[in-house]
Amino acid sequence: MKILIDNGHGIETPGKRSPVWPDGAQLFEWKYTREIAQRVALALQKQGLDFEMIVKEDTDVPLSERCRRANAIAAEVGVKNCLLVSIHNNASATGTARGWEIHTYLGKSKSDECATIFWNEAKAILPVGTKMRGDWTDNEPDFDSNFAILRDTKCAAVLTENLFMDNPDDCRYLLSDEGKAAITKIHVQSILKIT
């Protein structure tokens, strides 16, 4: 199986950053997700798994181009032989929301099975008490979402929302060495179980 890693937004995407915290720290989603994607890629390489970074640029690659790239690779190796993993950080209007969640496209598909593996790994890896945000209306933890990166790609695809960057506690954890290691491990362990 080929893993397609999509690392979210680009440097010029409006917003997509935490507040500047009292200690001067700030999380930029484009930078953070690229760091996590690189860590995941390195771990997959060590395991001998086949992967490709969909976005190699720091600039904001349009969703249509990201989907085109993913679909071109899927056409080469076979749609059933690919999994797209899109890595993000969440944010809310209030800064009070917390937790980890995962999204797939509407309806039932192989993506839902993959998302459940990710959700279970996140629950096992994140610190006790971390809020696990799930949508159980269809007896599965993933949120069914009409996101372009999920809708317009032909292979199985999941989108992770790795805690809330505008929540001070979530963001502090994300920026810590422990947090970065945990977010990386969630993705790597999930991919290893799926492949």
Image (cartoon, rainbow, N blue to C red):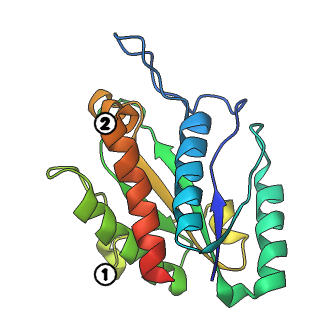
| Residue found at x 42% / y 80% | 193
161, above or below 49, in the image = above
Q: Position of residue 78 (x, y in %)?
A: 75, 88
Say left or right for 8 vs 130: right
| Residue found at x 47% / y 81% | 194
**Between 14 and 155, which is closer to the camera in this rendering?**
155
| Residue found at x 81% / y 58% | 64
193, above or below 171, in the image = below
Mark 1 crowd level (few <14, some 14–19, many ≥20, 10 Å Cα): few
| Numbered label attached to residue 57 | none
Q: Secondary structure at mark 1?
A: loop
**Between 108 and 116, which is closer to the camera in this rendering?**
116
Answer yes or no: is residue 135 visible.
no
Answer yes or no: is residue 164 visible.
yes
Residue identifier under label 1: 139
Mark nearer the N terminus (2 vs 1):
1
Disc 2 marks which amino acid?
Tyr
- Pair 2/1: label in front: 2
Mark 2 crowd level (few <14, some 14–19, many ≥20, 10 Å Cα): some
Q: Position of residue 184 (x, y in %)?
A: 44, 54
| Residue found at x 62% / y 37% | 30
Say left or right for 127 vs 168: left
Q: Position of residue 177 (x, y in %)?
A: 36, 37
The image quadrant where one finds the N terminus is bottom right
Residue identifier under label 2: 173
Query: Given the current orientation, which residue lies at the most extreme left position?
Result: 128
**Between 127 and 164, which is closer to the camera in this rendering?**
127
Disc 1 marks which amino acid?
Asn
